[in-house]
Image (cartoon, rainbow, N blue to C red):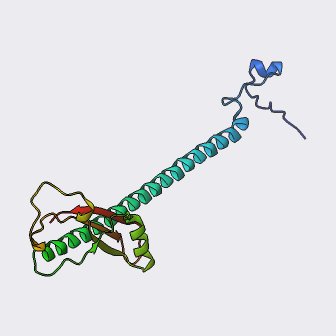
Amino acid sequence: MLRTLLPLPRLAITARQRTGLRAPPLFTGTRRQRGAVLFVALIMLLLLTLIGVTGMQVSTLQERMASGYRAGNLAFQNTEQQLILAESNVRNQVNSASPVAATVANCALAFQARNWALTALDGGATQGANVRRVDQCFGGSSRKMPQRSNENTNQFYQITAYSVDRPANPASRAAVDSVFIP
């Protein structure tokens, strides 16, 4: 048997390979950086989550503040409406022949609008007005005293009104005190 020996193809061998040195890889340390990229990505995701949660909390707080402001404003508007209604009733009664339905003030006792409003709450009332005639509590003037009671033009009324924002589910209350001269 005749064998022919064919030469084996030789691969190109560089000078470094002859000396035993290997060529440096194109991307150095890629295996070590894979965990670092994941760690940085997780930190960035955590920061974005914190920013989102903070933004939601700020929005919720702003909504609560706006709701509280609205409830207080509605209660104040309802109270002013009660005050205007009571003033209108006093004005109509003063101009008529019937006496004004007002309690005559005891000048020795101070009237506490807050206590009256709290008492009105005990009965479950959500709005109301208290009318007091207080002109006797003030000193006289240099004007000529009237001869008849219906000629008295120095009538002073203290009107205290109370109301809530929503009668069904009150969240805010308001009381307004006014001195009314018809």
Q: From what the image shows, is residue 92 above or below residue 44?
A: below
Choose between 57 and 25: the one closer to the eye.
57
Residue depicted at x 17% and y 79%? 99
Position of residue 84 in the picture relative to residue 61 (left or right): left
Residue depicted at x 46% and y 55%? 61
Q: Residue furthest right?
A: 1
Horizontal and vertical percent position of residue 13: 75, 23
User: Can residue 71 be seen at all in this image of the molecule?
Assistant: no
Position of residue 131 in the picture relative to residue 116 (left or right): left
Choose between 117 and 157: the one closer to the eye.
157
Quarter of the image for residue 93 reads bottom left
Choose between 100 and 135: the one closer to the eye.
135
User: Can residue 134 be seen at all in this image of the molecule?
Assistant: yes
Horizontal and vertical percent position of residue 50: 56, 48
Residue depicted at x 18% and y 73%? 90
Quarter of the image for residue 166 reads bottom left
Residue depicted at x 20% and y 69%? 87
* Quadrant in which the C terminus is drawn: bottom left
